[in-house]
Each structure stands twice: as structure tokens, then as C-alpha cells.
Image (cartoon, grey):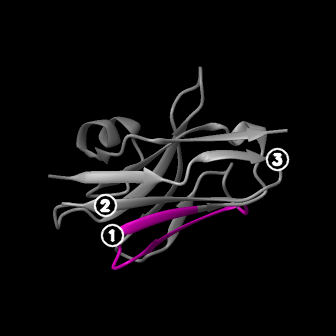
Amino acid sequence: QVQLMESGGGSEQSGGSHRLSCVASGLPASVHCMAWFRQAPGKEREGVAAIADSDGRPIYAQSAKGRFTVGQENAKNTLYLQMTDLKPEDTAMYYCAAANHCYSNDKDWDNLGYWGQGTQVTISS
């Protein structure tokens, strides 16, 4: 059974740093991409960062570039998201996801990806 368990959510002041983790278990060998998504109240879900096995190079949304770092550890069973210079607009539910590929289409992630339950990050000004 596939499980993605996020942790590390909480409240933070604007300008602060925070680290999210996602522990994966039961992923099939065909999974080669892990990613972070987020959804703020009243907004659509957006991809934040992803990392693929093929080259290990991270992919970032424009909103995350220069502030967030995505990586894997523990034999790639753990995905983390190190967030710095946090802003109120970073407030959202953050989700960990895994898929066979780093899809560029949200529908592919919906239909083919594995998802965690999410962890809330709240940034106050």
C-alpha cells in the first residue's frame, strides 16, 4: 500500500524558514518523480517543486525559485522542502505527491499520481 506522510507544517512569521518532510512507503519501482504541491484557500492547486530520479535536478515554480529547496534523503524515501524567506502568500496546504514522471499536466498528477494528506503552513505578516 502506497503511503505518503507529510510532516512539518505549522505557523511561521514572515521572513522565517520552515522545513517540510514527506516519508514515502510502498511506492512501486515505476515511480521516478516526487513533488510538492500547495493549495491556498480559494485558489487552485499549484506545483511548487519536483525532483526526478533521472537526473536529480529539481524543478521549481517561479514563486519558489531562490527561496525553496527540494531534495531527497534516506535512500530517496524522504522528500523534503526547505522554505526560506517565507511570505504570507505561501500560506497553504502543502501536499507531497509521487508519480512515474514529473508530469507537466495537473490532470495527469490527479489521475496517475499518489498523494499525501497534506500539511498546513501558515505565514503571518
Q: Are marks 2 and 1 in contact (CB under 8 Å)?
A: yes
* Amino acid type, residue under disc 3 in the picture: Ser
Nearer the observer, 8 or 43: 8
Q: Which residue is mark 1?
A: 77
At 68% from the left edge and 42% from the top edge, which residue is drawn? 90
Say whether residue 90 is left or right of residue 55. right
Nearer the observer, 94 or 46: 94
Estimate the spatial distance between the alpha carbons at disc 1 and disc 3, rounded to whole Å: 30 Å
Q: Which residues are magenta?
A: 66-81
* Amino acid type, residue under disc 1 in the picture: Asn
Estimate the spatial distance between the alpha carbons at disc 2 and disc 1, rounded to whole Å: 5 Å
**Which corner quadrant of the image does residue 116 belong to?**
top left
Say whether residue 90 is left or right of residue 85. left
Q: Which residue is mark 2?
A: 24
Q: Are marks 3 and 2 in contact (CB under 8 Å)?
A: no
Does residue 49 lie above or below 107 as drawn? below
Q: Which residue is mark 3?
A: 14
Judged by its main secondary structure, the magenta piece is strand
Badge 1 element? loop
Sequence-first disc among 3 and 2: 3
Estimate the spatial distance between the alpha carbons at disc 3 and disc 2, rounded to whole Å: 29 Å
Residue 22 placement (x, y as % from top left):
42, 58
Sequence-first disc among 2 and 1: 2
How would you rate the neighbour count of disc 1 (Cα within 10 Å): few for under 14, some for 14-19, many for 20 or more?
Answer: some
